[in-house]
Amino acid sequence: MTQTAFAEIPPEVPLASHLEAAKSIEGRSPWQLALERLRHDRVAIASAVVIVLVALMAVVAPLVAMAVGHGPNTQYRDTGLSPGGIPVGPNSTFLLGTDELGRDVLVRIFYGARVSLLAGVVASGLAAMLGLVIGLMAGYFGRVVDTVLSRFLDVVLALPYLVFAIALIAVVGPSLGVSIGVIAFFSFASVGRIVRGQVLVMREKEFVEAARSLGANDLRILFVDILPNVLAPVIVYATLLIPLSIVFEATLSFLGVGVVPPTASWGGMLSDAINYYQVAWWFVVFPGLALLVTTLAFNLAGDSVRDAFDPRYARLFKAR
Amino acid sequence: MTEAGAAPLVRLVDVVKHFPVRSGNLLGRGTGQVRAVDGVTLDVWRGETLGLVGETGCGKSTLARCITRLYDLTSGRVIFDGDDISTLSRRRLRPYRRRMQMVFQDPYGSLNPRRRVGSVIGDPLAIHQVAHGGQRKRQVQELMELVGLNPEHYNRFPSEFSGGQRQRIGVARALALQPELVVCDEPVSALDVSIQAQVVNLLARLQRQFELTYVFIAHDLSVVRHVSDRVAVMYLGQVVEIAAQDELYSRPRHPYTWSLLSAVPVADPDRADARRRMVLAGDVPSPVDPPSGCRFHPRCPKAQEICRREEPVLEPRRSDGAGHRAACHFALADGEELHTVPQPAGMAAVQGAGAVPAGGADDRGPSHRAARD
């Protein structure tokens, strides 16, 4: 009887009682529990594998270039272009074909992964940190600080970001660093709002009052009592921000204000391919596929992270 | 104990705490005040338990947070062991924080869910740099044992404990610095009745062991009766009656006290039927705009013209000694009973022009902190 009851417990939901039989003294932190849930989430595992593969692509790009003997920016006008100047399709030399300048699409996709990952991870990391700091300050100190910071966030959120980004880059000149800065700047405001809201909730909790009645100062309350409780939603949001940042970077590159040519980036490749998609499908499909698979993996990973941190949400969602 | 000649541990002098409320209107900055605590004067004597009772929203919890200076007072003074702490800055207040602690109402909200119980209980020791490392751990485990928790559970998280156990954690945290005063803000009202008794008895045992002084807030009169030496009854931010526990329960002077006592359920059905009860009509009026004169008059069966005009003083009534004070123009005689349930029509007549109608829950002011207790 008890055995059937145990068998009915789905593996995704680790029950404290039966997982902890051995480790009954040491409690498991909410972080450990979230990790445990992630480990049992098949989608999370699958998307993690894809993300690791993309990261590997970025790392081994020079090795691939060496292996196939094609540099990322080298133009093979004799072998890589047809006599009429049209890119050649996938063949034994160019596994994924060439682009309009006779460069190897495969090698460029590997190199493009570097740009995308860098932009995605660094920009969302920056955005998350900036948003965290501003949200904590606005939520905790309230009053004038809150008013000033919140209106600032409103302004940032109200800016037509693409127009603004293009204008800004037109002034300071395009580069990967500038792109990352711009992406972070247009993403941190929503993180700031989320954090501010969470802090407002936490600030009213009795444990914060308890800390205050014990004589804790603001800094301690902020970092010991409030921060750990707002970190989970920030992590979730930051993970979901990565694919957005990747697409944002690709958009900038596509519009010609992102990474400076000839550096390979997926967005830039798509932009180049626009004039050739009728004659060179590989030129569009492979960079597009890379972008799609990567953002999809990050999105699914973000969903899983959210479910792991907030199991109630996952259950609500699955019940439908 | 009350008239012990010595100075009281805590003396509240005309303590007032108003919360500003902004009306939700864009143009006119119409601000009002929730008068959560409106002129409370009372003494807490060393070693006693002062019970504080009253309906939801009467300002009990606000008063508690004024005593421990979690709130800044609007006016009035809090004197702790002879020192006026009512205007001290947070830094200057720190030495006093060690001497007065709070136990909170919500066993779930009062413990940080992301921290291990050991560090929660060790917090006061860490903040005041009393003990470090292994010594702190040892002290925390002693505290856990003291309140009836397994010291081995040092590394667990609050979510792994039951409501009663969590409240014990809160008690352990409050006792860590060996305070003199512990303000218990409805420490048992969120617990099951069977668990309530355990926690109340724990508090009583600790009081004897460490000669603690308690301010014990509750809305459950039988719990308050069980633990308190003296009881103060609050209504709309003011103390309407204060007396030794047995005196208040046997000879209530204020009609509000009487009606609260008459509402306490009695386990014996025969006696329950025989007993007179007065059911209070209406809700507590809004503390934003409290009734004129005696604040209880719109709901009081004994109210007369003078009650609307003149605020009664909290003083001994009838033949009472100095320790039993009530704020009522028509204090009840010994054994007097009230059984006229005020009719809505009669109420309207008593209310008069300036008073706020005892309206629905919406009237109770915005969902402000003042409405918490």
Image (cartoon, coloured by chain):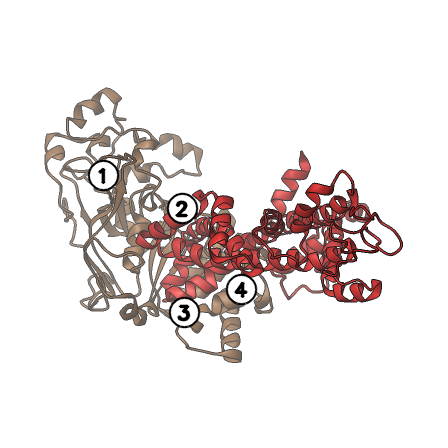
Chain colours: A red, B brown
Asked which quadrant contains residue B27, the reply is top left
Disc nearer the start of the sequence (4/1): 1
Asked which quadrant contains residue B130, the reply is bottom left
Of badges 2 and 3, the one in the foreground is 2
Which amino acid type is shown beneath numbered disc 2?
Answer: Val
Question: In this rendering, do the residues under marks 2 and 1 share a single chain?
Answer: no
Q: Secondary structure at mark 2?
A: helix
Of badges 2 and 4, the one in the foreground is 2
* Residue carrying label 4: B117
- Distance between the alpha carbons at the discs numbered 2 and 4: 42 Å
Of badges 3 and 1, the one in the foreground is 1
Which amino acid type is shown beneath numbered disc 4?
Answer: Val
Q: Residues within 10 Å of mark 1 (few under 14, many from 20)?
A: few
Of badges 4 and 1, the one in the foreground is 1
Disc nearer the start of the sequence (3/1): 1
Asked which quadrant contains residue A203, the reply is bottom left
- Front residue (pair B17, B107): B17
- Distance between the alpha carbons at the discs numbered 2 and 3: 60 Å
Residue B102, given in percent of the width and then of the height, sits at 37, 60
* Residue carrying label 3: B209
* Residue carrying label 1: B29
Q: Residues within 10 Å of mark 2 (few under 14, many from 20)?
A: few
Residue that extends furthest to the front in the rendered view of this protein: A83
Is residue B52 in view from this perspective? Answer: no
- Front residue (pair A294, B123): A294
* Residue carrying label 2: A155
Circles 4 and 1, Cβ within 8 Å, touching? The answer is no
